[in-house]
Image (cartoon, helix red, strand yellow):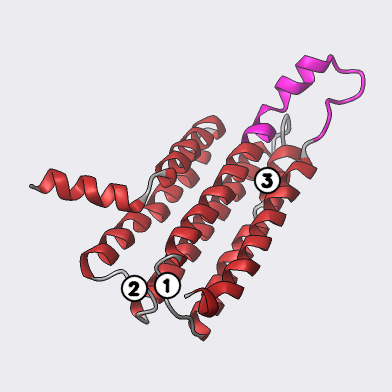
Amino acid sequence: MASETGRIEAYSDGVFSIAATLLVLELKPPAAGQPFWQGILHQWPGYVSFVLSFLLIGIIWINHHRLFSHIHRSDEFLLSTNLLLLLGVVWLPYPTSLMAQAVGTPQLRDAAIFYNASYLALSLFFNLLLFVCLRRRLADCGGGGARAISKYYMAGPLMCAMCLLASFWSVALSLTINLVVALYFLLSPGATAMKFTASAR
């Protein structure tokens, strides 16, 4: 497995780390002449979007690692869909910067909508990668385990769609739901599957 997917994982790790680092470049100091702490508090949506984006990139990396621990071979479809996922990862600093720049302006809600639409696209890319792995039998997790993992990740687009819809009504609510989604995906798919099995007994 290491020789087959090692280069894919190493390249992916580099992209994840660079994307996470770029997020902090968009955090700006308080405006000149404005009281320091008032300026800091005024930019709270920008800081929250930074933290959420950092968490999201980290959580995607964790789940990417979990998925690749089951992959025993690669093909052109895996390479292509993994590259598409990485495209979504490197895109995240841009909507995050728009959120930070829109603080205190009438464009904040539009920036939140764009930000959450990017979340939704990224979750779809991850599910596409998982679908390719299972459909083309690249993963070594059999029957029930594969189905449990796929059901776990399929909840992602639905949750991100909820965040997107909430952003039309309230930026604060959409960011709160984003935090809940991030915490959900911090859980191990294996642990979730075990809980499901235990409750069915």
| Relative image position of residue 170 (x, y in whole percent) | 52, 33
Q: Is residue 97 above or below residue 80?
A: above
- Type of amino acid under label 3: Thr
Answer whether labels 2 and 1 touch (C-beta < 8 Å).
yes
Q: Pointer 1: what residue?
A: 71
Picture residue at 50% right of the left edge, 55% below the top? 120
Q: Is residue 176 above or below residue 114?
A: above
| Relative image position of residue 123 (x, y in whole percent) | 48, 58
Marked residue nearer the N-terminal end (3 or 2): 3
Marked residue nearer the N-terminal end (3 or 1): 1
Q: Pointer 2: what residue?
A: 140
List the single residue furthest toward the left. Answer: 201
| Relative image position of residue 148 (x, y in whole percent) | 27, 59
Q: For this view, does 21 lie left or right of residue 71? A: right
Picture residue at 60% right of the left edge, 61% below the top? 88
- Viewer-nearest residue: 134 or 31: 134
Q: Is residue 186 visible?
A: yes
User: Magenta residues, as a range?
Assistant: 28-48
Marks 3 and 2, how far apart at CA: 36 Å
Q: SS at mark 3?
A: helix
Q: Residues within 10 Å of mark 2 (few under 14, many from 20)?
A: some
Residue 42, located in which quarter of the rendered image?
top right
The total number of labels drawn is: 3
Picture residue at 68% right of the left edge, 45% below the top? 96
- Type of amino acid under label 2: Asp
Picture residue at 92% right of the left edge, 18% below the top? 33
Q: Is residue 162 visible?
A: no
Q: Pointer 3: what residue?
A: 96
Q: SS at mark 1?
A: loop
